[in-house]
Image (tube, rainbow, N blue to C red):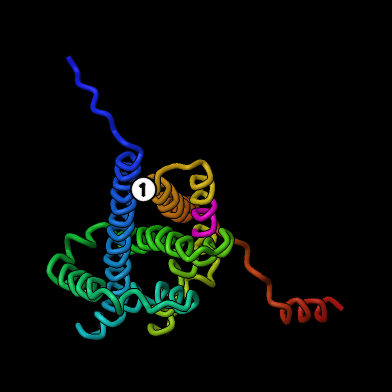
Amino acid sequence: MSLNVPVSPRQSDRINRAGKNMIELSAQGFTTFLDLLGTFAFAVSGIRWAANKQFDWFGAYVIGLVTAIGGGTTRDLLLNVPPFWMQNASYLIVTGIALLATIVFRNQLFRWGRALFLFDSIGLGLFTVVGIGKSLEAGLPFWVCIMMGAITGTVGGVIRDVLLNEMPLLFRKDIYALACIVGGIVYMISYQYDLSISITELLAALTVILIRIVAVRYHIQLPFLNPIDSERGGRNKKE
């Protein structure tokens, strides 16, 4: 025997609002989790690069922090909002945890030779979707959001490489920023089909990560731009 309790329209609206608020809170929590996980992955990547250059612990922390927050800071400045790490100390703490993990568990973390590449790829994918999500919240067109996702994912690595006196990975022939753009397109398609935010972000992040892994595994690269001066020199020699 079941009892049907009448629900007024006002109560029904309150129930619907409560349900929507719960969904929004869970989506925000998942995005925050991805953001912190991406921070850890990028920080480990930066710290490992700093270790190769024989930086001290503080220098390694700075390189890891710059790698982790550089892209997001650039994004927030373009969005004209306070940088995210100034409002939440978790990113500084997570970078410290990444440094400790690298020091204490370095043999376990980097037992696999491509672990550095894997951490960089994970951070790239996760930061791309976080950048797209925050740009959508700002009400920007989708093509701008995709660009913001690429900026969030790549600029930290560019700053890291410049500080380490390396050619930025973004400007090499490897598939890097292009993976972010493809991941952004997957995000857009999933968003248009009204998939949940969690599934949308996972699909987009996995797309970026898999493109990076497949491109490196099978040596899929963009062609070089041939130097103009060398072409002229070759023509002069032929003449």
Question: In the image, 75: left or right of 140?
Answer: left
Q: Main SS type for the magenta part?
A: helix
Residue 172, given in percent of the width and then of the height, sits at 53, 70
Q: Nearer the viewer, residue 111 or 72?
A: 72
User: Which residue corresponds to the image point at 17% horizontal and 70% vertical from the top-left?
Assistant: 97
Residue holding disc 1: 198
Furthest toward the left, the residue is: 104
Furthest toward the top, the residue is: 1
Q: Please report the bounds of the magenta region as a residue range.
A: 180-185
Total label count?
A: 1
User: Which residue corresponds to the image point at 54% horizontal and 72% vertical from the top-left?
Assistant: 171
User: Which residue corresponds to the image point at 34% horizontal and 58% vertical from the top-left?
Assistant: 118
Residue 182, given in percent of the width and then of the height, sits at 53, 54
Quadrant assignment, res 117: bottom left
On screen, residue 43 above or below 37:
below
Q: Secondary structure at mark 1?
A: helix
Q: Amino acid at mark 1?
A: Ser
Question: In the image, 146: left or right of 1?
Answer: right
Quadrant assignment, res 30: bottom left
Question: In the image, 161: left or right of 68?
Answer: right
Quadrant assignment, res 124: bottom left
User: Which residue corresponds to the image point at 44% horizontal and 61% vertical from the top-left?
Assistant: 128
Residue 4, given in percent of the width and then of the height, sits at 24, 23
Residue 114 is at least partly visible in this image: no
Residue 218 is at least partly visible in this image: yes
Q: In which quadrant will I find the N terminus?
A: top left
Does residue 181 show up magenta in the picture?
Answer: yes
Question: In the image, 65: left or right of 145?
Answer: left
